[in-house]
Every structure is written in C-alpha cells, then in structure tokens.
Image (cartoon, helix red, strand yellow):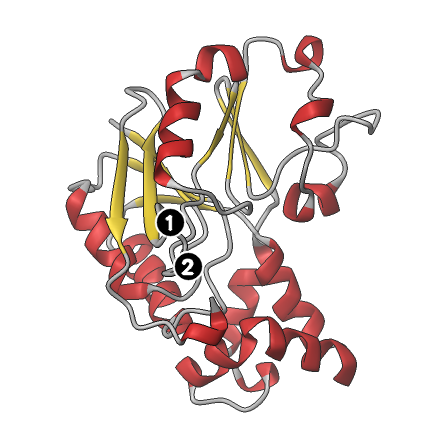
Amino acid sequence: MRRIAISDIHGCARTFRKLLRTVELTPDDHLFLLGDYVDRGPDSKGVLDTIFELQDAGYRVTCLKGNHEEGLEWALESVERFEHWLFWGGDATLSSFGASHPAQIPDRYLEFLASLPPVHIEDHWILVHAGLNFQAADPLADTHALMWIRNWYADIDYDWLGNRYIVHGHDRTTMPHIQAMRDQLDHLRVQNIDCGCFDLDTPGAGHLCAFDLDKRTLWFEPNVDMVHPWRR
C-alpha cells in the first residue's frame, strides 16, 4: 500500500485525473487530498465528481478542507462574502455547475465540503492544507490557521513536533523548491506540495504535485486544463 498526498487542485479536473493515471493509483493505495478542490480552474465540479467516483469505486480517499472550501461556505452567508468569493475565483466554480449562486450547487457537493476536517494525523505525518500556528498552546486546535496560515516556518516548535513531519499546500511554489524541501525533509520536517497548478505564468509552477509519504517520491503533472489568465 502506498500513501500519496495531493493538494490545491483548484478546478483542474483533467490535470487531476491525468496525475492519478501517472501515479497509477490503485484501490490498495491511500490517497490524501489536502484541500482547495474548487475555484480558479475551469472544472471544480469535475474535480469533486472524480473524488466521488474514486470513493464509490472503493478507493481509500481522505479529504481535508482548504481555505477555498471555507470561502465557498462563507459565500452562502452574505452578499459581501459572495462578491469577494467571485473575485477570488468562485465564478469559475459556479460556471462548472451551471449556477449563478453557490446555493444552487447540489446538496451532495455542499454537504461534502462542509463535512471535511482541517487536519489528519497519519502515523508520524501531520497532513493539513495551510500549516500550523505554533504560537498557539495547541497548534492543532487553531482550525483557522490550519486552512489559512502563511509564513509560519520560523515559528515551528521542533520539540512539540518531535519525530513527526508536516505535509501541506496553500503556498504555491515551484518544482525546484518542492524537490529541495524533499531532499532536506529530515532536517526541515516540512514538505510543501503546492506547485501552483493554475499558475501557468510562473516558471517552475503550473503543475499538480503528488507525494508518496513513505518512499518520498514526487510526481509533477503539467497543467492540461485551460485557465483564464486573469484567474492566475
């Protein structure tokens, strides 16, 4: 059994499915998805449908919530938050559902996104969308930070972390940087796997990344979805 993590798909359903073929995912593997399934890319519905198809076919898929999932939930609460979410890439999500408001997205999708946890502990791996707030008494208790925090590496409490490793997305970076982190993982104890799938303009980005937790293998799938330039 392999344990494979992917993060920040952002509506790039074709790239997601291609990456799953590249890693040759099987029902014996355990797939961990670290959030941000929706917004910006052209087919958020297709990303979620692919997850549902895997689960319905008996694949082991553990899904976490990202800040864009929470942003979609907030968009249901007020006009101001709805307009902010549209600017943030939510219009692409609505288009994939043929909807004009998130309340028109079918319940199965909304209920799935609302049910997602912000963190998963797998043996000595802490899997999370964004990161941990090490200034909190319990870094795992700050659920907002788990989905939203940035610039937290300097605060890592290695005594608290012990022999564990953190795998996260949220802060898009490049293939060379992700590979360098993997090569220094025993020292850093943190692995970012967000290769900016929707960011087709930054050299070294524009890929969807998968990470084998045990063998520490990295796969990078070039984006094959059409992403409008202003959404990047």
Residue 143, percent from left and from top: 72, 43
In this view of the protein, which residue sits in the foreground, 95 or 112? 95
In this view of the protein, which residue sits in the foreground, 1 or 232? 232
* Residue shown at 53% from the left, 81% from the top: 91
- Disc 2: CA contacts within 10 A as few (<14), some (14-19) or many (>=20): many
The picture quadrant where one finds residue 86 is bottom right
In this view of the protein, which residue sits in the foreground, 30 or 212? 212
The picture quadrant where one finds residue 97 is bottom left
**Which disc number belongs to residue 205?**
1
Q: Amino acid at mark 1?
A: Ala
Q: How many marks?
A: 2
* Residue shown at 49% from the left, 47% from the top: 172
> In the rendered image, which quarter contains the N terminus?
top left
Q: Amino acid at mark 2?
A: Asp
* Residue shown at 77% from the left, 81% from the top: 80
Up-down: is 199 above or below 41? above
